[in-house]
Image (cartoon, helix red, strand yellow):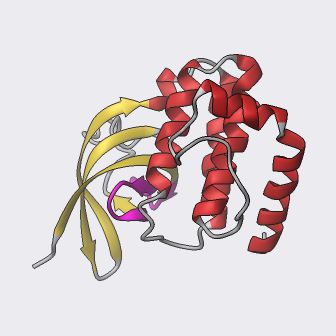
Amino acid sequence: MRVKYTTRGIVLARTHVGEANTLVAMLTEDVGLVFARAQSLRKPGAKLAAALATFAESELVLVRGKEGWRVAGAVLGENWFQRLPSPDTRAAAARVSGLLLRLVAGEAQDSVLFPIVRAFLISLTDVPPEQREAAEILAVLRLLAALGLDSGPIPGERAEDFSRHALSEAFEGRAVFVKRINAGIAASGL
């Protein structure tokens, strides 16, 4: 008998597999980064389509089988793509999630990544345009630190801190932080 895992997750990317199936890259609260197959997701009227859209945060039911993870159910909680106010904020979210997928080779059982990405998406919904870059810098620094690719001080008190004060510190020190980000990415071998 296969075990079902119920967890909250954010869809980072989707890849078409076959005629109607999709491989979904999800950052989950409990299981970490997983790649799960969603059957018939691309068929018209697919029940899970809205819950498994890119940047959708959903309650997920995942099943681990011989060939990997499979999505057994999903209920949409928040569609971050629709809540992000502009193409620039969507592009920032895409850059951060794309970098995360490149930095993590395969699946990762790291539950620290989910709150960072979720807090970053929340911050993008109401951050002023002049602080978007600072939010992106903070998110990337925190992801690099969580993955062991950066050990320097990061503005804010905790991983989910995208307060105005933390964003201001990130903006003021952006030259130093961008150097650290580049060093962390270089250390990853990308």
Identify the residue at horizontal 52%, vertical 46% (top origin): 158
Give residue 73's position: percent from left, percent from top.
21, 50
Give residue 118's position: percent from left, percent from top.
47, 41
* Left-right relation of 140 to 67: right
Task: State which quadrant residue 130 falls in.
Answer: top right
Tell whether position 139 is magenta.
no
Task: State which quadrant residue 105 falls in.
Answer: bottom right
In the image, 165 versus 11, the foreground residue is 165
* Left-right relation of 182 to 165: right
Q: Is residue 177 above or below residue 25?
A: above
Q: Is residue 67 above or below residue 24?
A: below
The part of the chain drawn in magenta is 15-35
Tell whether position 22 is magenta.
yes
What is the magenta segment's predominant secondary structure? strand
| Any part of residue 97 in sight | yes
In the image, 153 versus 119, the foreground residue is 153
Instruction: In the displayed orientation, state which residue is furthest to the bottom.
Output: 66
Instruction: In the displayed orientation, state which residue is furthest to the left.
Output: 1
Give residue 81's position: percent from left, percent from top.
51, 29
Identify the residue at horizontal 83%, vertical 33% (top origin): 172
In the image, 91 versus 129, the foreground residue is 129
Q: Quadrant of the N terminus?
A: bottom left
